[in-house]
C-alpha cells in the first residue's frame, strides 16, 4: 500500500500518479535498508574503551532521556493541538502527539560530532554524545512501535486509560529493545571475529 503525505487516502492508480510514487517515502526501506548500515558504521568506528567506560551514562541519556523527551514533546504538542480550532483539534488524539514526540525525539548530532572531531575535544565527551546519538535512534524506533501497539490495543478496549494495554506496550518496549540489543551485540561480535 502507498499513502500520500497529505493523508487524503490510499493511492489507487499508481500508473497515472508516477510523481506521487517517486515522492512517496517508504519507512520500511528506511528502517530495514538505510538505517542498519549507518548504525553499524557508527558502532564499528567507535572507540570501545571510552564507550564502555561511559556505558551507564550513555544508556541513561539514551533510554531515560529519549523517553522523557518523547513524553514532554508529546504533551506540548497536545497542548498546542488543543489551541487549534475544534475541527482540527478533534482530529489528533493524545496518542498521535505521543507518537510524534517519539519520532521527533531521536536526534542525530552529526554536526556536533563533526565539530568535536575537528576540535579534538575530550574523548569521554565525544563517546557520550556519540553513544547517546546511536542508541537514542533505537530507543525512539522501539518507543514509537510501542505507542502504535498501545493504540491498537487501546482501540479494542473500553476507552479511557487501558492498564493492560499500557503494560503490554511497556513489555513490547523492553522485549524489542533487549532483543535488538542482543542481535546487535551478536552481530558486532561476529563482525569483530571475522575482521580481526
Image (spheres, grey):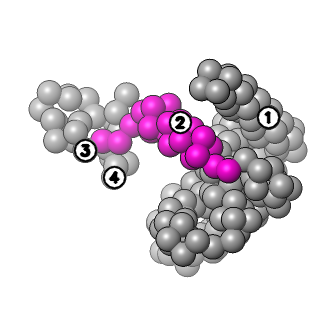
Which one is nearer the viewer's eye here, 175 or 170?
Answer: 175
Mark 2 or mark 1: name the one nearer the start of the chain: 2
User: Residue 78: horizontal and vertical position, in percent?
Assistant: 62, 68
* Mark found first going from the N terminus, 3 or 4: 4
Residue ID for mark 3: 23
- Quadrant placement of the C terminus: top right
- Which residue is under mark 2? 36
Q: Secondary structure at mark 2?
A: helix
Mark 4 and mark 2 lie on one chain; the one further toward the N terminus is 4
Name the residue at 73% across, 32% down: 185
Classify 10 Å Cα crowding around label 2: few (below 14), some (14-19), many (20 and above): few
- Which residue has dot 1 on it? 178
Residue segment shown in magenta: 24-47
Contact (Cβ within 8 Å) of mark 2 with mark 1: no
Left or right of 128? Residue 57 is: right
> From what the image shows, is residue 190 above or below residue 46?
above
Residue 14 seen in the figure: yes
User: Mark 3 to mark 4: distance in Å?
Assistant: 12 Å
Relative depth, front residue between 193 and 43: 193
Amino acid at each position: 500500500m502507498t499513502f500520500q503525505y497529505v493523508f487524503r487516502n490510499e493511492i489507487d492508480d499508481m500508473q497515472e500518479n508516477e510523481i506521487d510514487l517517486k515522492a512517496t517515502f517508504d519507512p520500511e526501506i528506511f528502517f530495514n535498508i538505510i538505517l542498519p548500515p549507518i548504525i553499524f558504521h557508527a558502532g564499528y568506528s567507535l572507540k570501545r574503551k571510552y564507550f564502555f567506560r561511559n556505558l551507564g551514562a550513555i544508556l541513561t541519556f539514551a533510554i531515560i532521556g529519549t523517553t522523557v523527551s518523547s513524553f514532554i514533546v508529546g504533551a506540548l504538542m497536545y497542548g498546542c493541538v488543543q489551541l487549534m480550532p475544534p475541527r482540527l483539534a478533534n482530529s489528533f488524539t493524545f496518542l498521535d502527539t505521543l507518537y510524534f514526540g517519539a519520532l521527533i525525539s531521536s536526534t542525530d548530532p552529526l554536526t556536533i560530532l563533526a565539530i568535536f572531531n575537528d576540535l579534538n575535544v575530550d574523548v569521554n565527551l565525544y563517546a557520550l554524545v556519540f553513544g547517546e546519538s546511536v542508541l537514542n535512534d533505537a530507543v525512539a524506533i522501539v518507543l514509537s512501535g510501542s505507542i502504535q501497539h498501545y493504540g491498537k490495543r487501546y482501540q479494542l478496549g473500553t476507552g479511557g486509560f487501558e492498564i493492560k494495554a499500557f503494560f503490554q506496550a511497556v513489555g513490547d518496549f523492553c522485549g524489542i529493545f533487549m532483543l535488538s540489543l542482543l542481535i546487535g551485540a551478536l552481530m558486532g561480535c561476529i563482525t569483530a571475529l571475522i575482521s580481526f
